[in-house]
Image (cartoon, rainbow, N blue to C red):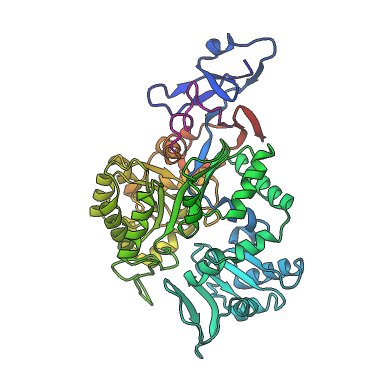
């Protein structure tokens, strides 16, 4: 036997045998789970025995919607979050100025984590503000929702956005009193240049790193995730260069992280023509779903809703497709046998998406199509989700970060019906929790806490009737998450024959008050039987 972990509080996430004291690992798989005495008998002369001393061991955590590659890039850029000290507009400008001072002129720089409602002075930054940071670099200051951005004058010139440039379909170029672009870009006006265009801003920035630097970027990101107990993630926005980087670093043996790569529908035709289907790849990096963006975000007021958003400005959001358009996309990829993952937030977007799925997919959902976020599902729409067998991956850690923005956008009453996690579980809808990092911190323990207490950053209740338990929340990061990559037979629980992916914490999170759960310290993360992190 290679390794034995004994004297622990083991939470298996298996329904029939939820607890154990020890487990044995052989050839990267779990060989035995049981009592300490039972497992100790398997020890041989070269077995490594690790005494857990009562610490809690549970399956490795899986983030089913995490922009891993974008987060890896952004952590090398300007951190403009309040947590990084940017509590006023001028702090954001200073962070960008510092980054510009250390970047060659003409190269793109990014800031991330910014939103006016997160700042003490509620400052709506424009190109004029960003021009104070630098006039020698194009700047893209990404909104915390990643559904908009602010750019400076240099960037507007690079993008070719002028007074005569019309708003693109599904997006807005905001303008000043004279009709000139003021630097604020919404939805496709920002998403197009950042991601969809070829070459996009993201592609240009990644191409500026050499092969080894890109590899090191991904390795650092994986190491950070390991420190949080995360053993794998589904990256919903992987282009060709990033996919190649993932495979290269995995082949080098330096990336012990299970990455499921989703391909944007705009980029999917070459993969379809080559016959590259879901699951193609290795145990470390494999193809996942085709990703489609249907509408915008809630705090940015671009989610497609039937009833206008609350407060000044109103509006009913933005759609990237009409009904015929989204129906064609669903039919195209479902018909080709691809799993589909659709970003949909507002009830108007959900209505269109559910109609498209209803017209096309096989009941029971054998391809495991899923809705990402699903924050504003109405009761009748939940009925359709259940009837069709659709999956949902959503984000509890939005509540403490963006919840106040959600309440501001939807109003105090309407906002209490958002993100109906408790209802999903009662209806036995296949459901997983995720972070949508870099929108929110990737730390799953924050997500678990927020799924239980459902309060905003300012302490306001956020649909408390839809609270779930700590046990349920951890199941959604482990056992239930494995279904999204068709890996429930080999991952997600601690059972003989499954991958030896698990995390050791200093305390039992199920025994703590919800507010205390993020205080748990990850002491060890194991992937494929190998210790990849020790705290």
Residue drawn at (69%, 10%) of the image: 45
Residue reaching furthest front?
273
Residue drawn at (61%, 62%) of the image: 202
Which quarter of the rendered picture does the N terminus lie within? top right
> Magenta stretch containing residue 492, yes or no?
yes
Which is more toward the observer, 339 or 30?
Answer: 339
Which is more toward the observer, 38 or 335?
Answer: 335
Q: Is residue 393 above or below residue 132?
A: above
Q: Position of residue 403 (x, y in %)?
A: 43, 58
Q: Is residue 21 left or right of residue 357?
A: right
> Magenta stretch containing residue 143, yes or no?
no
Q: Position of residue 80 (x, y in %)?
A: 62, 63
The overriding secondary structure of the stretch rendered in magenta is loop
Q: Is residue 206 left or right of residue 56?
A: right
Q: Position of residue 303 (x, y in %)?
A: 38, 65
Residue reaching furthest bottom?
178
Q: Position of residue 157 (x, y in %)?
A: 62, 80
Magenta segment, which residues?
486-506
In this figure, what is the number of numbered marks?
0
Q: Is residue 446 left or right of residue 225?
A: left
Q: Is residue 477 above or below residue 176?
A: above
Q: Is residue 71 visible?
A: no
Which is more toward the observer, 341 or 462?
Answer: 341
Which quarter of the rendered picture does the C terminus lie within? top right
Q: Is residue 415 above or below residue 518?
A: below
Q: Is residue 330 visible?
A: yes
């Amino acid at each position: 036997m290679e390794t034995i972990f004994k004297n622990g509080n083991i939470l298996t996430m298996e329904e029939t045998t939820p607890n154990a004291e020890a487990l044995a690992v052989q050839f990267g798989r779990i060989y035995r789970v049981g009592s300490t005495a039972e497992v100790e008998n398997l020890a041989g002369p070269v077995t490594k025995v690790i005494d857990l001393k009562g610490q809690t061991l549970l399956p490795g955590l899986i983030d089913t919607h995490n922009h891993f590659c974008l987060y890896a890039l952004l952590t090398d850029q300007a951190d403009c979050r309040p947590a990084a000290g940017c509590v006023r507009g001028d702090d954001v400008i200073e962070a960008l100025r510092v980054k510009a001072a250390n970047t060659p002129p003409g190269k793109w720089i990014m800031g991330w984590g910014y939103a006016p409602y997160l700042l003490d002075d509620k400052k709506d930054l424009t190109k004029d503000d960003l021009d104070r940071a630098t006039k020698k670099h194009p700047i893209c200051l990404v909104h915390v929702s990643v559904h908009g951005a602010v750019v400076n004058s240099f960037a507007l010139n690079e993008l070719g956005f002028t007074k005569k440039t019309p708003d693109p379909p599904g997006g807005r170029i905001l303008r000043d009193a004279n009709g000139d672009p003021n630097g604020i870009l919404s939805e496709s006006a920002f998403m197009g240049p950042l991601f969809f265009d070829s070459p996009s801003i993201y592609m240009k920035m990644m191409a500026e790193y050499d092969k080894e630097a890109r590899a090191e970027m991904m390795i650092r990101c994986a190491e950070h995730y390991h420190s949080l107990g995360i053993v794998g993630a589904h990256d919903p926005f992987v282009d060709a260069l990033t996919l190649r980087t993932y495979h290269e670093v995995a082949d080098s043996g330096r990336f012990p992280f299970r990455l499921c790569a989703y391909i944007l529908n705009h980029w999917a035709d070459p993969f379809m023509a080559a016959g590259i289907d879901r699951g193609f790849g290795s145990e470390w990096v494999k193809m996942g779903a085709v990703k489609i963006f249907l509408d915008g975000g809630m705090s940015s007021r671009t989610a497609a809703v039937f009833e206008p958003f609350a407060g000044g400005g109103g509006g009913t959001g933005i759609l990237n497709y009409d009904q015929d358009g989204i129906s064609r996309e669903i039919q195209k990829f479902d018909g080709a046998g691809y799993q589909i993952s659709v970003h949909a937030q507002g009830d108007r977007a959900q209505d269109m998406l559910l109609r498209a799925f209803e017209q096309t997919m096989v009941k029971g959902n054998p391809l495991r199509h899923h809705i990402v976020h699903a924050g504003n599902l109405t009761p009748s729409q939940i009925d359709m989700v259940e009837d069709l067998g659709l999956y949902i991956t959503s984000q509890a850690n939005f509540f403490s970060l963006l919840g106040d923005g959600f309440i501001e956008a939807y109003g105090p009453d309407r906002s209490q019906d958002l993100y109906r996690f408790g209802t999903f579980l009662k209806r036995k809808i296949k459901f997983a929790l995720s972070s949508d990092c870099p929108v929110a911190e990737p730390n799953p323990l924050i997500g678990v806490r927020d799924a239980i207490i459902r309060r905003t950053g300012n302490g306001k209740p956020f649909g408390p009737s839809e609270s779930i338990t700590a046990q349920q929340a951890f199941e959604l990061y482990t056992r239930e998450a494995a279904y999204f990559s068709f890996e429930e037979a080999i991952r997600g629980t601690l059972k003989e024959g499954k991958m030896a992916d698990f995390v050791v914490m200093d305390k039992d999170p199920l025994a703590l008050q919800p507010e205390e759960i993020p205080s748990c310290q990850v002491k060890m993360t194991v992937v494929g039987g190998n210790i990849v992190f020790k705290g």
